[in-house]
Amino acid sequence: MSNSLPDDELLKRYLKDGAQDAFAALVQRHLALVYGVALRRLHDPTPAQEVTQKVFITLARQAVWLTRHSSLGGWLYRTTLNLAQHEWRADQRRRKREEIALELGTCMKTDESLLSTITPLLDEAMLELRTADREALLLRFFANKSLREVGAALGIQEDAAQKRVSKALDALGERFRQRGFRVGGAAALALALQQSSAHAVPAGLALSATQAAMTAGVSASLGGLTMPIVKIMSLTKIQTAVLCVSIAALPLGYQWHALGNARSMNEQFAAQLQTLRSEAFARERGQARAERRLALAQSAMSQSTAGQRAAARTKPSRQDEKLYAWDENSPYVRVPKQVLAQLRFAPFGTRVRRDGKTEQYQLPPLAADGSPQPPLVAALGLSADEADRLRALCQSEFSQFNELAASHSQLTQQPFAGGPMQSAILDTAAFPDEGAQFRDQFKDQVTALLGPERADAFWQQDSPVFSELFNNFGANARKLELINNPQQGLELMNATAGGASIGSLSQRNGMPLPPQLQAVADAWSAPQAGQTDQSAPPSP
Amino acid sequence: MKKILIIAAACGLTFCLWLHQRHLLQEVQVQNERLAAAAAVLKERVSRADVARQTAEQKLADLRRELGSHKANASDVASRDAGAELTPPAGPDASRQGGWPANAAFFYLPKQYLTNVSYKLLNGGQLTDEAAALFGMSAAEREATDKAFDELVDQFHRVEIQRMEQVAPPAGWVTTGDSSAPSGVQFNSALTYHIPDLTGDIDSARTAFFDQLQQTLGPSRAQIIAPAASSFLGQNMDDLGAGERTIGFAWEPESDGTQSLWYAVADAVHGEGAFQRVDANLDPNSQIAYYARLFGVNVPGQ
């Protein structure tokens, strides 16, 4: 069966299955050619046999790369020549050429003498032929194929094969003629070629060549890796393209599918969430409304129960409603004192937000010099005299406190964090005892002026100022660092034992700075100070 | 050899594409996990709200029955209280800008200073006691104002829910080892929504609200409250969705294996991203708490 297979199929079988019978068939098929060429080059059967074995060992080793070779016979022919040349020393070849040269042009050779003369140069002349011509001659005369078989092997018709053989013989004859040989016609040359290839192959050479190739361990290397390489090498361009697409398509397709699923799930979740959000929103609104109705009912219940009314008073009663009812004709409103803690009385300023819109912020109830702002004065119901006395008292106390704080402070100016920006640091030590004494005296004076109820209200309204500006009357050490930031404007870092914060001066909502720092701020950038604060406190 | 090289190149390219797709897949899968968690939270809230509503309605029914039995008694108490409080209150003293009557439960404030008073206008979707008291609102006026505001918020939130779209976190919000993140914090995942400018959608509801305010309280009070309401809406409800925003919650992995929750917003005011850590002290009536509920994000301690 192996004998009927073409060369490439035999090679593939050998590579894929390690089939020795396939390789043996190849050896059998080309042994005469290889041995004949070797013997012709070496003139000695022993080295010719060695070369023959080497050729088939080489075939076994390079079988991977030969499955797609157009003509195995051609490859074997060339390889045999190469290996034979290694066996035959160059000097011996030169000597033979010299001997031949002596005979050039001296006489017309007979066909017999022609054979003996041209044999040493036959292979060189064969190598000079075009590949197609050489293949035709190899098949016709070295492999002893009929013209039909030659045509089949070359993929041409029989008569075309005949023409190619004739043309190749003519070309070969021309090569010899160029070298000075006087050769006869194509028929004579064909006869000479047939004779030159008709070497009796020694018995057992096929077996020994096959075994040599097998025992060279070549077949052992033709394992799992070789066959895929062979298959890849034997692919057509389209098959290669299909393989590439398959390689890419399988993992990427699977992943694409997973990604599609995940995205689809994502969309489903988004839709589900949309529904759920609407549902949750509606249900929770319903819950809030039910709870609101419940709260109203509970309020009504508490009001209807004697003795619980005053304690559970969260909303004005009907009598309160009358007392506090809005009177369009009155310039005043009555405000329950119990909500005073939730109200802040001070004018508003405006500033520009990052998005270009303006926003309002409320200024402190006491101005930088301590003067109570008009809304606070009005809320406390001060007479003009009381307002003057309170203003004088606050200004005096502010002045005194600033002196007291200054005596515990140290102002230094230095580059901020060692960089190009300037900074001024006001380091104030804690003075809790002196501060508490000052606070108590201040509080007593306010109480004496306003009475306890309004004094409490005054103190409660002004607590942010006392906390921020007076640092809770010196209760803790504090470090204020004013930074001249060319990009952001003036910034203030406030560091206490509890932590540090930094922010733009414009974000302080008009809260004054200690006088020492204010002087530095004015000196650094007077225009920036009024840039964001666009409103002045309204006059009463 | 050329074919082997071509196939090797195809393998390499495939591997690169596979890695890229794997990254995308992981991102979507993390998003899906977040969304699934959000859906679970929302479902739980729906059922919880149902239970709470039923409970409140049951209690309400019980209270109404009880209220009926107390009606006669309450009516007697009211008559006695009315008699006691009918004493005329101290009038305003013009020399003291109204004054501070020592024995009264109130003080006078000139109306001109009502615009110089800061107060919390609304809490939990309702007018605060101080706001109602400051403007001398009756129970009916207060209820009508509450209802008007409730409808505005309801309308706004409905539109917002309709228009919001879940989106991938903006660039830099979720980072892995990128020190240039705008937050300065390394978040490993985020759940983000884009809300377009809702001005056009909400304008009619806003106008209706201010009309209702004027109708309920009259022009003088409405004129004072309207800016306060606008300011409240601006500070607490993104001015009813004026300007497109991207808002979301991001999770920061902690060294102990837990995750911290951050609220993030990107808009014209906050730029590419303003981040605020969400802790257990979050006001349940705040905007952050509202969005956490809306997105189905569990807030620590709530």
Image (cartoon, grey):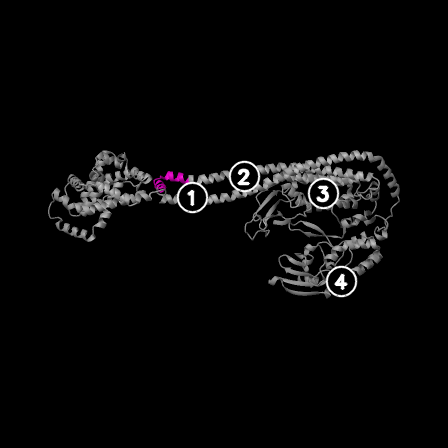
Residue occupying image coordinates x 76% and y 43%: B222
At mark 1, the secondary structure is helix
Q: Residues within 10 Å of mark 2 (few under 14, many from 20)?
A: some
Q: CA distance from mark 2 to mark 1?
A: 26 Å
Instruction: Judge by depth and name the residue closer to the eye, A171 or A16.
Output: A16
Per the rendering, the mark at residue B124 is: 3
Residue A21, quarter of the rendered image: top left
| Chain at numbered mark 3 | B
Instruction: Judge by depth and name the residue closer to the eye, A266 or B89.
Output: A266
Q: Say whether residue A143 is left or right of residue A355.
A: left
**The stretch drawn in magenta includes residue A295:** no
Instruction: Judge by depth and name the residue closer to the eye, B66 or A327.
Output: B66
Q: Looking at the image, tell me whether mark 1 or mark 3 is earlier in sequence order.
A: 1
User: Is residue A286 shown to the viewer in this render?
Assistant: no
| Chain at numbered mark 2 | A
Tag 3 and tag 2 share a subunit: no
Residue A467 position within the rendered picture, expressed as x and y whole percent measured from the top left? 73, 57
Judge depth for marks 4 and 3 and give the one in front: 4
